[in-house]
Every structure is written in C-alpha cells, then in structure tokens.
Image (cartoon, grey):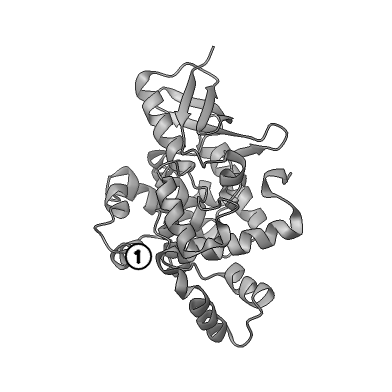
Amino acid sequence: MGTRLNIGAPSDYRLARDVCSYGYFRLAPDRWDVDSQSLRTTFDLDDGPARAHIVEHDRGKLRVWFDRSLSHAEQRTARAYIRRMLRLNESQEDIAAFHSVDPRWKSSGRGRIFRSPTLFQDMVRTITSCNVTWKSTQNMNRRLCDVLGRAGAFPRPLRLARARAGTLRGRCRVGYRDRRLIELARLFASGQIDEQWLEDPEHPDEQVYRFLLKLPGIGPYAASNIMQLLGRYSRLAVDTELMRHGREVLGFAGTESEVIAQLQAHYEPFGKHRFRSYWFEMWTAYEAKHGPACQWQ
C-alpha cells in the first residue's frame, strides 16, 4: 500500500476549476483525468519517483494517493510540491482582494492559476513555450520527462545540468534551447537562483524582473510569465496570444505597438492583478469556444 496524504485547502478552492486554469496542466508529467476529475502526476523524490493521484475529497480537503510508501521527509517535500502547484498558499483573502479590483470573477471564484511544483520546472516550461506551437511545447516536455526524468518524472536540475546539448537537441527536440536549458539548470543546481528571494514581497517587481532577464533563455515575455508564476501579477506577458486576444476579443486595431498600448491601458485599472484579469478574460474566451477546460480531452 502506498502513502495517502490529506491536504487542507482554502474553503473556496475547487480542484477542477483551479487546476484547469492554465495550460501547464496539460504538460508532462501532469495529466488531468477527465473521467474522475482528478490530477495525476509524478514527483521525483529523494528515494525515487512516486506517482501521485490528487482528488478533491470535500470542500477545503484534498486527498493524495501515492503508488509507494513515502518517508516522512518525502511526505514533507510532496506536500510542498502540491501546495505550490495548486497555489494553496493563496488565501481566500488574497482572492477576495483580486475580486475587489476585478469583480467579474467573483461569482465564478476564479483567482488561482495552476503552476508547476517547482520554480525550475516553471522556468523550463516557459522557455519551451517560446517561439513554437503548443503541440511542440507538449512534445518537448514529454521528451524531457521520458529521456532525462526518472520513471517519467520531470528531470531534476542536476540531471539536466549534466545532460549533453546533443541529447537535448536530438532526443528531446528542444532546438536552440539546448545550451540555455543546461546553463539554467546549472544555476539551479549550484544554488545561484533563490526562489525565496524571488517571491519575497520586500523585493519590488521591477527588481525581480531585471534579475530574471539576466538568466539564460529568458527574454521579456518569459520573464513576465515567470513573474506571474512567482505570484507577481503586475506585468502582462506580451506574446502572440495576448496580441490575438487584443485584436479578436477586445477589438483593438492598429500596429503591434498600438495594440500593445491599448492592451496596457485596458488592464491598467487592475494594478498589481493585471495578469490575472487578462488571463481569466482570455481563458473564459477559450472555454466559450471549446467548453470547460476540465472536460478537454
């Protein structure tokens, strides 16, 4: 019998809504099970990989089954991973503050945006989403797990840091990102990237943003996206999706710079919640076309 964990969540938390809120829930090793409305993933823990099955047991209560027994230290790590990826650290008060700025999302309860169990995984996923189709992003992440991960888990920084560029390019199909990903992994493996410093509210957004821009493979879009993955929602991540949303949904017209200026003005009233307001505006437009994300096959 494997370990079972009970994890408390804010009473307003809804697993299906809050997991299926961002595209990373469709990247390996994460898999949303439409039939059971639950999340399956694999964590690389100290004693090896462990497959996890996360279900909503009751309001404010999550239950997690693992396919093997976990040590106490592994249980602590797994809890931290799950709390991070599900944004359980964002309290009802945090969400209420967002809803007070943008009340459009109060009735649906939207506010939390799914992310990865680690910042390293978030950064790699962001880099592999730049300048490619979404299908290519999915393929790259699946291959990284299959080729470099243990039993299909996402590879740890040290494993990726020791990989050969040819392996990343040839077998994982990451293209020009090969050496950049290795350099980034080495920074994580050596402890030169401090997640606590990046998330500390004492450090202003602009300071964190400038730091991110210095990292290998991180440009303006990637840095802005990583900001929201750190819980800093004040910046818009400008990419083709934002531009498409501005033109097709909001009806903005003009050159690229003119549309960006209109987008910045449109989201300015939402202040430090700009990204949240944009994201849920775009995500609900997706769902209007394709149905609820928790039902996407």
The vertical placement of 33 against 109, above or below, is: above
Q: Position of residue 201 (x, y in %)?
A: 28, 56
Extreme residue toward the top, this view = 1
- Considering the image in quadrants, where does the C terminus appear? top right
Q: Position of residue 51 (x, y in %)?
A: 55, 27
Q: How many marks?
A: 1
- Considering the image in quadrants, where does the N terminus appear? top right
The vertical placement of 25 against 71, above or below, is: below
Q: Position of residue 127 (x, y in %)?
A: 49, 57
> Residue at image x 47%, y 23%?
5
> Residue at image x 40%, y 24%?
75
Amino acid type indicated by mark 1: Tyr
The image quarter containing residue 39 is: top right
> Residue at image x 63%, y 82%?
252
Tell me if residue 212 can be seen.
yes
Q: Secondary structure at mark 1?
A: helix
Compared across the picture, whether 43 is left or right of 161 comes to right
Neighbour tally class for label 1: few under 14, some 14-19, many 20 plus, Cα within 10 Å: some
Tell me if residue 165 can be seen.
no
Q: Position of residue 248 (x, y in %)?
A: 69, 74
- Name the residue carrying label 1: 209
The vertical placement of 210 against 113, above or below, is: below
Say which of 84 and 160 sits in front: 84
> Residue at image x 38%, y 52%?
184
